[in-house]
Image: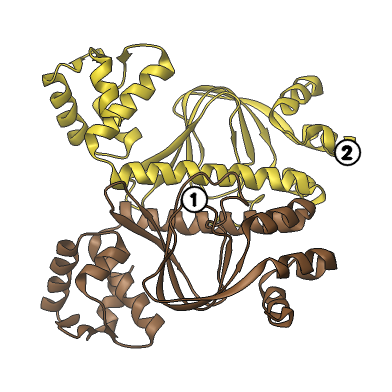
Chain colours: A yellow, B brown
Amino acid sequence: MGRGILEHAYKEIFPFWDRIPEADREYICQNSYMVTYPKGKNIHDGSECSGVIIVRSGSIRLYMMSDEGKEITLYRLHSGDMCMLSASCVLEAITFEVFLDVEEDSECYVISGPAFAAVAKRNPDIKIFALETAVGRFSDVMWVMQQILFMSMDKRLAIFLSDESSRTGSDTIRLTHGQIALYMGSAREVVSRMLKYFANEGIVEVSRGGIRILDKKRLHKLTF
Amino acid sequence: MGRGILEHAYKEIFPFWDRIPEADREYICQNSYMVTYPKGKNIHDGSECSGVIIVRSGSIRLYMMSDEGKEITLYRLHSGDMCMLSASCVLEAITFEVFLDVEEDSECYVISGPAFAAVAKRNPDIKIFALETAVGRFSDVMWVMQQILFMSMDKRLAIFLSDESSRTGSDTIRLTHGQIALYMGSAREVVSRMLKYFANEGIVEVSRGGIRILDKKRLHKLTF
């Protein structure tokens, strides 16, 4: 793969790129590859170091899973996002397992974990960047935890629908109740019940095609 | 306060201590103080930077709280433990709020946040250490999240009672059901019901004085 494309991408993503020796830049590029993951594929299951994953396009869901297979979505990675939690060999302090599934066909750059770790060992700037990325995600996870443990379901669902509508730029959310429950770490029955409540209030309209937001103002009010 | 005592403690706690310039060691010591917090005191409420707290003796509980005042215990700090999450001015990537309450009278060293941040800026080793400490706690919090979200209540209570018994070296856990619920991020009613179940099974004996473990083997079995 041409080093030019990688250089261009890494310059955008890594604030340290211009400050590290040319030999290290070369080494990172040599130990990178570009890959297109198809929708639905599991690309990391916590058992080994899958490397540093950088999303060029598409959408990847990061979640935790219980022994019984129950899932909690922690966050999603979109274009320009980077995953350090998939590179357990880079950050030894990370002792928990997460899973990564491809939600939409995704083009990614992947840097080999051992190669990234070797360069980070020589350049404190990189080590600090990797750790700060992980700590930033710690903040995201704490937010999810607050949502799941503390917030009432109506508020959570309202926030989910608003966010999804903003993200897709559409008033119609084309997801099944089961999918919404999965994203929210809830049960399908709970989501269906709350959507029915929202529909009765005239806030949304539920049909086979998805959930259409009718009253943005009231939905917004519920998010506070 | 004598610098000797601080030097001795910091040498134990900080792996970078001998590698940073004497001027920075002096600066950290000058911006440190020792304090004894009484049981029950709230020493950090998330609103400002309380500095880096190092526990010399005692026990401090770190928890998150909802707008409605519901609490979830994330972990506890004991002798030799250090809290970076209370020093939001040191790690900018931490954008969530935690609370710290003193559980038992606690002697602590506290390093001013801005002073620690200034020295960390000059010494990448310190910055890396601070971030790694935070990422290590990320792992702890993920474990708590797994416990709360995924594990069944009997298993969780069994683990709590076992841990508490090991920690205190006693078969009797002198906590109220409400206190146990608080520590476990559960409701008092749920804890009481499960304790009654354990008592019926002959695993524990519940009295005014606390919970006495009668059948360690079976309690242990429940933790798997």
Q: Which residue was labeled with disc 1?
A: A97
Question: Label 1 to label 2, Cα distance in Å?
Answer: 33 Å
Relative placement, left or right, of B74 versus B207 is right
Q: Which residue is pictured at 17% across the width and 72% down the height?
A: B195
What amino acid is found at the position of numbered circle 2 in the picture? Pro
Q: Residue at x 58, y 30 (%)?
A: A81
Q: How crowded is mark 2: few (under 14 residues within 10 Å), some or many (20 or more)?
A: few
Q: Looking at the picture, tell me which residue is in the foreground, B88 or A39.
A: B88
Callout 1 amino acid: Glu
Q: Mark 2 lies on which chain?
A: A
**Quarter of the image with the C terminus of chain B in it:** bottom left
Sequence-wise, the earlier of marks 1 and 2 is 2
Q: Mark 2 points at which residue?
A: A21
Q: From the viewer's side, name the closer residue of A109 and B70.
A: B70
Q: Mark on residue B213?
A: none
Q: Does any portion of residue B222 appear in the rendered image? A: yes
Looking at the rendered structure, the secondary structure element under dot 2 is loop
Q: In this view, does B2 lie to the left or right of B168?
A: right
Say which quarter of the image contains residue A157.
top left
| Same chain for the residues under marks 1 and 2 in the image | yes
Q: Which chain carries label 1?
A: A
Residue sitting at x 37%, y 22%: A164
Which residue is painted at 45% across and 50% down in the image?
B97
